Image (spheres, rainbow, N blue to C red):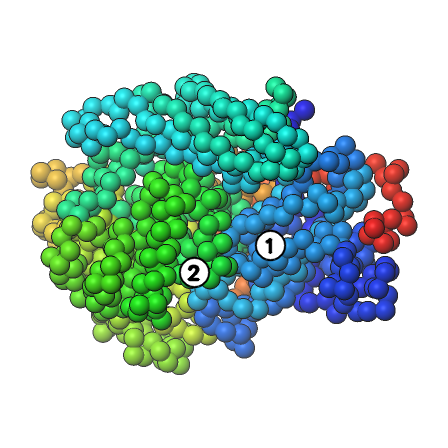
Amino acid sequence: MKKRMAYNMNFDWQYHDGDLETTAYESVHETRFKSPIWMKAGNCGVAKWGYDTSHWDNINVPHDFRVYRGEYDPENVPEPEGFLKMGIVWYRKAFFVDKSHEGKCISIEFDGVYRDSEIYVNGHFVGRHLSGYTSFHYDISDVIRYGQPNVVAVRVNATNYEGWWYEAAGIYRDVRLVITEPIYVKKDGIFVRTYMPMNSSKLFRERKEIPSVLLKADIDMGNDTSYEGMLKVEIEVVDPYGVSVMSNYDTVKVDAYEDKIITLEDVIIGPKLWDIDSPRLYTLFVTIKKDDQVMDTQTLTFGIKDVQFTSQKGIYLNGRSIKIQGVCVHDDFAAVGGALTESTIRHKIQILKNMGCNAYRCSHNPPSPYLLKACDDIGILVMDEVRLMSTADEYIQQMTDLFKRDRNHASIFIWSIGNEEMNIHGTPTGVRIMKKLQRLAHRLDDTRPITYGNNCNWYDITKFHENHDFHIDVFGFNYYVNRQFDLYDKIHAEYPDRCILGTENGSGQSTRGQYLPREEELNPGYYSERSKTTSIWANPKRKYNVSAYTESYPLWGSTPLETLKAADKNYVAGYFVWTGFDYRGEIFPFTWPSVISRYGIIDLCGFMKDSGHQYRVHWTKEPSIHLMPHWTFDCVGEEIEVVITANTQEIEFICNGTSYGRKPIAPFEAAHYFVHYEPGEIIALGYNDGIEVVRESHKTASEPKCIQLQLVSDYALRANGEDTIMVQVKVLDAFGIDNPSASNRIDFQVEGVGEIVGCGNGDPLCHDHDHNHHRALFNGLALVVLKTTRQTGTIRLTASSDGLMSDTMYIQVTEKADDQLVPAVKDATLEVYDTKDAADGGL
Ligand code: GAL
């Protein structure tokens, strides 16, 4: 039998919208008092078997209750609420724990609950967690009813914000129940890291293999028994190809109920390095034995890599100079909001990888563990970030928890101790806090540097830090202090031995597929008061039109090409573009009826914007070109601006058969053409050494005739009831040309082993409920998100629309679920169940 069981607890929850007027139940003190939770132990009636929840909704987690409600309302707050109201809600779930588990350690783990949650089990308060972003867990062994139904209830008070962007609310990440023997490896109790040999830089320079690395593994163990004596701890390392390459053990003496940390060291010969181009992962197996009997086993993956931050040449990854081509991202997506499952996260990361992005900044909060797993697997470097810069116990704990949870991940290359803490960062208080956090970071992880997203007048603030003896590992700068693009040179001249990283850049705004002004947005009344003084419309012709041309940004921002150019200096390690994807809230410069930000270089559905393509062109090594706009307009004779971006030496533009000539294109410049629109075809060609190496073209589409469904997610689907399936929806004309301005409403139906989660179209003005089974295309595109059930088989998706030929798609789900669900009460043998015990919570 497996020693450690981790049960999936995501299914079959109940949800109550709003606080509960009474939490009372028929037990001691409860009949006389409405809310007797804090009077006696075990007094929370909601968390008792038998409490009436018949009027509650049945839901599964991850659950974002703001998107679940889906009520966009101008009475709510634009930023950060995104016009979706916050609130207090309750969740409740019943589960069964077998009698045989009595005496073991049972804990409940939450990857993330937004926010200020109180957790009760069988009437007992088991913990309160303030942060909406850090993971947490509670040992509930004492209050479990063995061999009987158990109930967990969670009160979520999401009435306050932690950020200024859209934040999911509720139990929006996974929940699990973990059962171990009472001698066990603690949660996040392993820290494995490797150290390169002293001469590694020389070896990398000479392109020689690294002969070996030193591995150290700290293992933090709990002993919840009266056992006093020796424990044996074994480790085994398996390389990325499944070969066991190292094993070692040590013994340690424990006293009764004593926890112990043990460190094992050994050498890995001929390490296979983790890289963005070859994300090779090792596996560490840890076993604890008592008298040769296995007590616990734990497995985790890690990577071996070498990252050097230099002052003159930026970052070296495994001896190779690379530029950080990163994006900042918030957790949001069409159809699901912030309730991102593992597969949805993977989909987002794969889109970034496909466009040549190589780094991700978790802005500005601890991420889902699945985010780091996806980046480990796919090969994306991560800047992991704390939510708030403070040395209060609460935040020291949050930072410690974050580091302990995440520090084994291969993808993390730097930590961020905060972002734009304008109240303090230029003051002695800020310096004291930053020094302490830097010390803490180094203690928690001696292998990675830290940075901080410094903004506003970061030039002076940095000097202030340096003069007050605060020397951060890596200078992190957000933007260029109101577009002073020469500031990097200035600070580099001042501190030539320091490394510079653009922690946040860009903030260009654009609307996917929107080239001509949109009536609804031309009214200045739709713009926030603040935007009137802080918005820049680089092209006065398109003032009040956040078009797809990527010409609008706030005072501190820049266009994609300006952003790329500003960081094109050897001594700059790279940059993180604000933002990878659109997200709800932070709708600057707009106000109602806008509900989604325009900062993304990819929209909320994962569809690339032109800004995304401009980055792609410069992030890919292969010859790349981008041509905008599309060529399906109804404004015959009017002037249309055509823009070409390329990474080739020369380009050529051809419109309806006429060439505008071949010409050189400078890096980070675009070629602009002004053409009187006639239907037909436009082509952009890229040349290197006089030879055509790449081309892109757009043809005019006629009337839409049929719907086209296309699967855009590409991972193997598991029948786990959670894996999402992303299907892109377009309409085509009679010649198969897709119509990029279409707005047809499409209806979706699913049969077989799948369900519709919801839809999206990326339109910042769309107020449809995310979970609807229909959507109008926005500028020719929509997304329908499906999910698997817990059965393998075929999913049949049909899309239909008035006047259009339908399309049907078949999707195979072949892999069985690899998880185990926590036993449900209905599955359990209830012979031992006694009603008296149930009524008073088993006390
Ligand atoms: C930055 C901030 C981000 C976002 C961005 C918008 O200053 O760090 O969170 O608000 O501005 O441009």
Q: Earlier in the sequence, mark 2 or mark 1?
A: 1
In the rendered image, residue 261, in percent from the top left (x then y), is placed at 50, 36
What is the spatial separation of the Cα atoms under label 2 and label 1, in whole angstroms?
Answer: 27 Å
Task: Give the residue displayed 46% in from the left and 56% down from the top.
Answer: 396
Give the residue number, with chain letter if any, for mark 2.
391
Residue 536 left/right relative to 134: left
Which residue is identified by label 1? 171
User: Residue 359: x and y, percent?
Assistant: 33, 46
Nearest the camera: 15 or 251? 251
Vertical position of residue 723 compared to residue 58: above or below: above
Query: Residue 357 falls in which quadrant of the image?
Result: top left
Residue occupying the point 90% across, 50% down = 836
Are the two marked residues, 2 and 1, in contact with CB atoms closer than 8 angstroms?
A: no
For the point 20% across and 23% down, the residue is 208
Q: Quadrant of the N terminus?
A: top right
Total number of numbered discs in the rendering: 2
Residue type at numbered disc 2:
Thr
